[in-house]
Image (cartoon, rainbow, N blue to C red):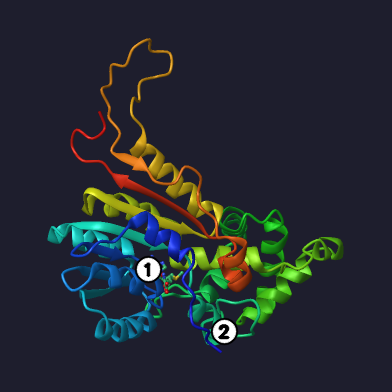
Amino acid sequence: MSRVHIPVLAGELIDLTAPAPGETAIDCTFGAGGHARLVADRLGPAGTLVCIDRDPAAERRFDELAAEVACETRFLRMDYADGLALLADEGQEADIAYLDLGVSSMQVDARERGFSYSYDAPLDMRMDPGQELDARAVVNEWDERQLAQVIRRLGEDPHARRIAREIVRRRRRAPIETTGELVEAIEAALPAAVRRSFGGGHPAKRVFQAVRIAVNGELDSLDRALPLAWSVLRDGGRLAAISFHSLEDRRVKRFLAARARGCICPPDFPVCVCGHEPEAELLTGRALAPTPGEVASNPRAKSGRLRAARKLGAGEAA
Ligand SMILES: C[S@@+](CC[C@H](N)C(=O)[O-])C[C@H]1O[C@@H](n2cnc3c(N)ncnc32)[C@H](O)[C@@H]1O
């Protein structure tokens, strides 16, 4: 059963991005529109909310929201990096842009979409069902070396080679068609002592994360989107991102830190000769994590990390 997606770190996102009446905001990952609704309420009738999502189910949710909120709304069903590039080409400017990365509860809980190791379903994992590449192709067609790399890099799974070897061994007999068959392959690849070491966690969690990120090209989209989102912000605009694993958070952190950096002279220069000025003020020193209360009421919030920055206007850096 598809549960309603509960927006993560919602109060913190609103506090940091501070949507004001008449402003323009871009929600890059609309999902069920939980964050979007809170933002729209603050933008009021003179404001504009542009929403992006590649999932048609999100577009249906957007239609409901658009009928209920006072601000002007627009939806782009596409990869958010492409959506931001389109908006930049159109000369759209914004006061706020935010991303709430990963998958929604509706996606995970829709069994037939194959995102979850908890249900047996066809191997799919596409956020955009019109996309050609799916999890079945990654698991059955990528060679052993590529699979091991994906599992290690995108899942940070130390048993990547062992798991890739077992997947390839099994698929020689018959293609791996379902999430259940993939879970069986992962479990068979791990010695009993390793399987026991997962405690309450699931031994397939990292592999499923890795395959999902690969299928949806999630890190490439994020790398393309961050500079585009920054480029459409007006002076004083706010950019925020909620990440759910270290690969995403590291990218957001580095991107914002690079914008906030002043002098970029080599450390051994006695005086600054670069004249480089910061473009951003960091609004979060360390990433914000959900409170224990939020995690208790929404366990899926647990790994959420929020970072945000404000774009400085000309002369503000001095
Ligand atoms: C965590 S959910 C967002 C939930 C939303 N903030 C809410 O409160 O309901 C992430 C959403 O982003 C979408 N998404 C993820 N990566 C995307 C991308 N590269 N382009 C467009 N949409 C993407 C997913 O389809 C999903 O609906």
Ligand 1 appears in which quadrant?
bottom left
Location of residue 184 in the rendering, given as x and y in whole percent from the top left corner: 73, 76
Q: Quadrant of residue 289?
A: bottom right
* Residue occupied by mark 1: 29
Q: Are marks 1 and 2 in contact (CB under 8 Å)?
A: no
Q: Residue at x 52, y 86 (%)?
A: 2
Q: Is mark 1 within 8 Å of ligand 1?
A: yes
Q: Which of the labelled discs sits on residue 18, or is there none?
A: none
> Is residue 237 left or right of 303 when viewed as pictured?
left
Q: Quadrant of the N terminus?
A: bottom right
Q: Position of 168 compared to 199: left or right?
A: left
Give coordinates of residue 255: x percent, y percent. Answer: 39, 44
Q: Nearer the viewer, mark 1 or mark 2?
A: 1
The residue shown at (53%, 84%) is 3
Res. 152 visible in picture: yes
Mark 2 sits on what residue?
Answer: 122
Q: Is residue 86 left or right of residue 305?
A: left
Distance from Cα at disc 1 to Cα at disc 2: 25 Å
Q: Residue at x 64, y 63 (%)?
A: 206
Q: In the image, what residue occupies the spot 27% across and 27% down?
A: 276
**Residue 174 visible to the viewer:** no
Tell me which numbered mark, 1 or 2, is placed earlier along the sequence: 1
Pointer 2 local density, CA inside 10 Å: few below 14, some 14–19, many at least 20? some
Residue situated furthest top in the rendering:
270
Find numbered disc 1 in the image and state the secondary structure of the residue it sits on.
loop
